[in-house]
Image (cartoon, rainbow, N blue to C red):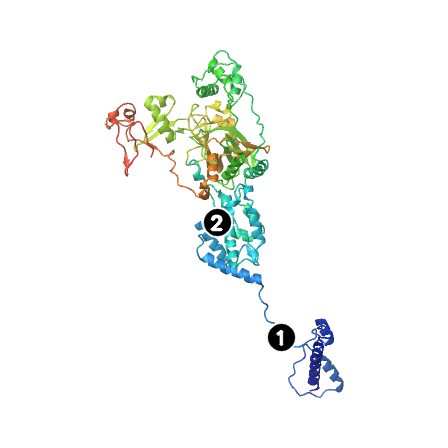
Amino acid sequence: MKTLRFDRLLASTALGLALVLSSHAAQAQTPTAKEVESAVPMPDTTLPPPPIVKDLEPKAEPAAEAPKQAEAHAAAPAPVTAAAPAAAPASTVADSAVSDRLRELVSGKLDRSFSRKADREGVEQFYKARNFAPLWVSNGAGNDRAKAAVAYLGKAEEVGLESADYATSEIKAGASTEALADAEMKLTAAALTFARHAQIGRVHYTRVSADMQFDLKTVDPASVLNKLADSADAAKTLDSYNPPMPEFKALREKLAEVRKSGGVVAKAEEAKPAVVHVEEGKMLKPGMKDERVVALRKRLDIAGDKTNENYDNDVRQAVRGFQKTAGINADGNLGNNTVKAMNGEKKEAARGPSGDPTDIILVNMERWRWYQRDLGNPHVVVNIPDYTLTLFNDGKQYWKTKVVTGKPGKNTPLISAEMKFITVNPTWNVPPSIIEKEYLPALREDPQALERIGLKLRQDPDGTVHVSQPPGAANALGRIRFNFPNKFLVYQHDTPDKHLFAKEERAFSHGCMRVQNPLLYGEKLLSLALPQENYTAARLEKMFGGSEININFPKNIWVHLTYQTAFVDDEGKLQLRKDVYGWDQRMIQIIKGSERKVADIGVERAPNSSSKPVKMQPGMYGGDTARNSGPNFFDFLFGNAQAAPQPVRNGGRNHYAPPGRISQR
């Protein structure tokens, strides 16, 4: 009982002292916590709690123990009262409110912010997975991620895009819940649109030309948002959707330089070979030997030994090709009229740009977005406006040569395809478009036209017409063909018309690519595809004959047909080329016109009909005339008007046209 009384005494004394101190506010300031602590003995909380008293009746204790017990009780801690929970910070409440608002927006209609179904589905998937926690808002304001993203999108021009296409709203601290949620959605929409444009372009290739085909790999919206959420650098993440190819990065740097200079491009001096002069003299024909043949080989850039004085078949074919181009008698003999035409040929115009350099760089950067991110190793790149073919290996140029590409209207297409094999001694199966538009009209004028140039015509029982040229030195494909199957039926091949490689602009083919040094090209390809086989140009030449020989690749090699009117050369200089097919101007028109708002949406185009077979009424060519009393092919083509066949109908559609015109199916 003494102990309890002593405890009460201490408690009342402390309370009294506190009341006394508080009653003298007029004489002194309110005591601080430290003053109170010094005035009132505080318990030592480091000591263990006092033992639980089970019995209120004291036991007999020695007198000497009483002071110790009183001291222990005096030092015991006061009972601890549970504190009331602290109020949640205002920023936490704000973020929670934004989440609730995002839940409403995402669960409702997202059409206002996201026009694409894939974006709406991706946004819903992303925000649901994080319980609608905002991506760009933290503590009631825009976070560092948002600031980095907004800053990067505001400089989209640096990568060839336009910042106006990725508009955002400032995420202000203290803004209303609705404003924060709306700004969140707007920035999300801008980020997704940029990632898609950076990945596959803001102009869909189908809007430019039917002579293009790409397998575009667009972005997955939810994946983009998750990547941004996990990243410490939003700007770097957004930038990663741009093409990684060195060609694109080089143009990106040149774009900044050209803009800084006000659109002025320093003209790069191109090393152009001097035109070789051929002396006049006696007429040269195949089988003759003359020192002027050396100059002739150099003038026409005939492949092989340039010091060879023999007027062989290669020289004859080159001269004949030049004569055709010059519009003179193409007999393949070198007379003085041909020599004068060679020496007096006007210098071709420089391959300059066809518009503003800034715009040209922009559309070239845009086209790189259509190509797959991994071009393959090794891989081949054909640059149509530059008339070059380059073989790359391990990221470096391995070999390069000249090519002849399609003439305007017979465009070499833009595609990526895999080269699977090489054919030595190829048969030329004439494309249906050439059969219809060129050979059948020629046959109307001259029934022996195809036979004279070594072509064979046959007709299948279903009416399909085939024209082919067997292997040989005069074959239009030359002695070797490089095959990468594609819907446009184009490939790379040799050619007997070597003279065209001497020209600066070489758009003369029907779409295929004629290679200047095909045997060396074959050697280089096979050194990478079949390194253990030790193929050389000489070994390939020994395979020349009358039968096709295929050399299959164990691993396909990617071939990319490109249209680079702007590129950076090996010396780091910007090169600009002529817009041969008008594709630059078409893209610039789209980007700067009203069509730009929907330019990233593909359009339907009529199917490419160049590969569809030409069909005529069965039995028109060939067949047993005793059993077939109807008109044959030549009866129809050459004057038997009354025997004109009836159209072959299929489902109400005519697959055969009136006399004088052949249709394709």
x, y (%) of residue 18?
Answer: 70, 77
Label 1: which residue? 81
- Could you tell me which secondary element the residue under label 1 belongs to? loop
Position of 628 with respect to 57 (left or right) is left
Q: Quick one: quadrant of the N terminus?
A: bottom right
Q: Mark 2 Cα within 10 Å, few/some/many (few <14, many 20+)? A: some
Q: Residue at x 42, y 29 (%)?
A: 510
Can residue 535 be seen from the camera position used here? no
Label 2: which residue? 220
Are the residues flagged by discs 1 and 2 in contact, CB closer than 8 Å? Answer: no
The amino acid type of the residue labelled 1 equals Thr
Q: Nearer the viewer, residue 210 or 595?
A: 595
Q: Is residue 199 above or below residue 7?
A: above
Query: How far apart in space, not on screen, are marks 1 and 2 (Cα)?
Result: 55 Å
Q: Nearer the viewer, residue 474 or 356?
A: 356
Q: Mark 1 Cα within 10 Å, few/some/many (few <14, many 20+)? A: few
